[in-house]
Image: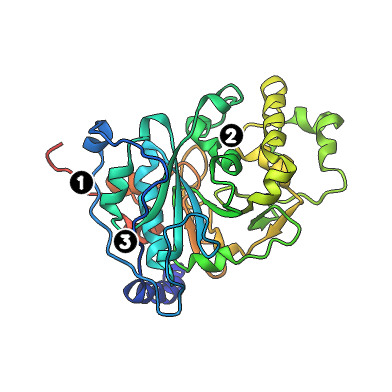
Amino acid sequence: MRWLIRFSGFFSAALIMIILSPSLQSFPPAEAIRSSTTFLDQRFSFRSSPVFRNADECRAPTSDVCDPSLVHVAITLDVDYLRGSIAAVHSVLQHSLCPESVFFHFVTSYETRNLENLVKSTFPHLKFKLYTFDDAIVKHLISTSVRQALEQPLNYARNYLATILEPCVRRVIYLDSDLVLVDDIAKLWNTRLGSKTIGAPEYCHANFTKYFTSVFWSESRFSATFKNRKPCYFNTGVMVIDLVKWRAQGYTKKIERWMEIQRKERIYELGSLPPFLLVFAGYVAPIEHRWNQHGLGGDNVKGSCRDLHAGPVSLLHWSGSGKPWMRLDTRNACPLDSLWAPYDLYVHNTRR
């Protein structure tokens, strides 16, 4: 339990921020997306988030998605991860000094496209827009993975943010649905990328070779892609992306090209991560590890409990197969899952 004692001081400070922190105003989506009563309305029920307002030193909020003072955050809304996405948004608002200056871009699948009313009822003052991701764009490029969840088309939506979001959006923070922040997202937003297109915490001690098959490493036409590069592993669940550079360099096409090769040659096993490594590893602006304390969901098979990495914490990430809401519901929670629970707005329906 020593890790809990070490973490308690930081987490207590985070709780103080929650009490003192501000909140968001609603923003009507630029395109009307009809909401209707579907199985999603019946399956999910969330209580309304508290109202958070900007601190006095923040700029006055606007409802213009092109306002350069906004912090842009992209998150997917998936049926199986919706509860996690809602908790992630809640955590961002609670710890932001200027929550009314955060704009959320929610990318949905066809089956979750009618979530506007649910989002508005949960976060009545949120600035957001919903975008329906066309599965057909990427479905033919997806190959089997070590975990079925990694094969879902929406898992690849991050590859297309440069075309999904408005052209005036020049930078975006991409966040996975299985994480919570315990720090102000503006600090992450202000990361300097320099000449790089993406920024993320890198882990250069990790065994980089394991992310690709023996076919990849034995064929110089593949492995030579890392020649004259110093590639390090990075987790794509937390990234700061310069969309201007991405669009100019056509990185979506470069990622798709590796996915096409994968379909024929089987050069990796792990879903949407390896194509990002192939294109960007060695060309990533490093961000402090505190912004992605990942792996809390255990491995991709057993989902066993894990401790925090050494060092300060700004973001907790349950990457891996074990998700905190599932483990809490089955009363099989890991110690760190209790740190996710305060952000959970899900209402259990006892009549079901």
Query: For the residue carrying disc 2, how many other residues have a C-alpha within 10 Å: few (<14), some (14-19), or many (20+)?
Result: many
Residue 186: percent from left, percent from top: 52, 67
Q: Residue furthest bottom?
A: 56
Q: Residue furthest left?
A: 351
Find residue 271 and name its label. 2
Query: For the residue carrying disc 3, how many other residues have a C-alpha within 10 Å: few (<14), some (14-19), or many (20+)?
Result: few
Please state if 203 lies on the left or on the right of 152 as rendered: right
**Three-letter amino acid code at the position of disc 3:** Pro
Whether label 1 touches label 3, CB < 8 Å: no
Q: Secondary structure at mark 3?
A: helix
Labels 1 and 3: the sequence-earlier one? 3
Q: Secondary structure at mark 2?
A: loop
Q: Which residue is mark 1?
A: 348
Residue drawn where x is 36% and y is 43% of the image: 82
**Three-letter amino acid code at the position of disc 1:** His
Q: Which residue is mark 3?
A: 342
What is the C-alpha distance between the residues marked 2 and 3?
A: 30 Å
Residue 72: percent from left, percent from top: 51, 56
Q: In the rendered view, tell whether residue 276 sits above or below residue 313.
A: above
